[in-house]
Image (tube, rainbow, N blue to C red):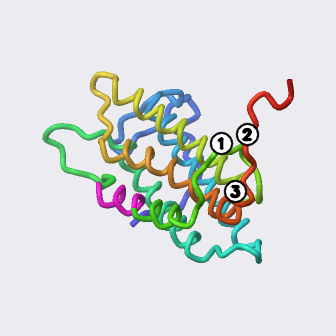
Amino acid sequence: MVVLNRIYTRTGDDGTTALGSGERRPKHDLRIGAYGTVDETNAAIGIVRLHLSAASNLPASGLDAMLGLIQNDLFDLGADLAVPQREGKAERLRVLSSQVERLERDIDALNAPLAPLTSFVLPGGTPAAAYLHLARTICRRAERMMVELAAKPNEPVSDAAIQYMNRLSDFLFVASRSVNNNGAGDVLWVPGQNR
């Protein structure tokens, strides 16, 4: 259980922050940036959920439940990144392949009623869809940072964590089409339209 009695500690005033292991890193460290961007993804999903609850014309209850699970998963993923896996150390909270598999099942369920795409989709349509696209782009940035981090010596990132973010961006794309009247409200790219 996490207990936060005091919000400010002043320990970060020197430009460093602590990983879950207690190790201090500069706030501009790639690992800190990666789990900060995972948190940013989570915040954007929170805005999506706000728009889903406010939109009476959207069948949002199933999607909202999926997004609630994802928000919790993203905290798991942040905890995973905050404590680098080290040989001989006790195992901490890690993202599991079962979480990736659940995302895949949810993608398939949301994608089933959608018509095939005939063009790329521009962010837009309903407010919820536009924010799902925003969450998707933030998610992709987090994934790129995690892949870059994993390529560095002594900076382990679990395969399941990277796979989760890869699937999440796909989920967010399909969810955006779902809330855009199952794709009927998608804003499609028209190549060269404004020449």
Residue for point 67% across, 60% down: 48
Does residue 4 appear in the picture of this structure?
no
Of labels 3 and 2, earlier in sequence is 3
Q: Position of residue 27 (x, y in %)?
A: 53, 31
Q: Which residue is mark 1?
A: 119
Residue for point 60% across, 77% down: 61
Does residue 68 appear in the picture of this structure?
yes
Q: Position of residue 110 (x, y in %)?
A: 53, 65
Is the Cβ of the residue at disc 1 closer than 8 Å to that at disc 3?
no
Three-letter amino acid code at disc 1? Ser
Report crowding for label 2: few under 14, some 14 to 19, many 20 or more residues within 10 A (C-alpha): few
Front-lying residue, 11 or 32: 32
Report crowding for label 3: few under 14, some 14 to 19, many 20 or more residues within 10 A (C-alpha): many
Is the Cβ of the residue at disc 1 closer than 8 Å to that at disc 2?
yes
Q: Point out the stretch of residues depicted in magenta.
A: 97-104
Q: Position of 69 compared to 154: left or right?
A: right
Q: Which residue is mark 3?
A: 129
Q: How far apart are labels 1 and 3 at the CA level?
A: 17 Å
Front-lying residue, 12 or 99: 99
Front-lying residue, 188 or 48: 188
- Secondary structure beneath label 3: helix
Q: Which residue is mark 2?
A: 189
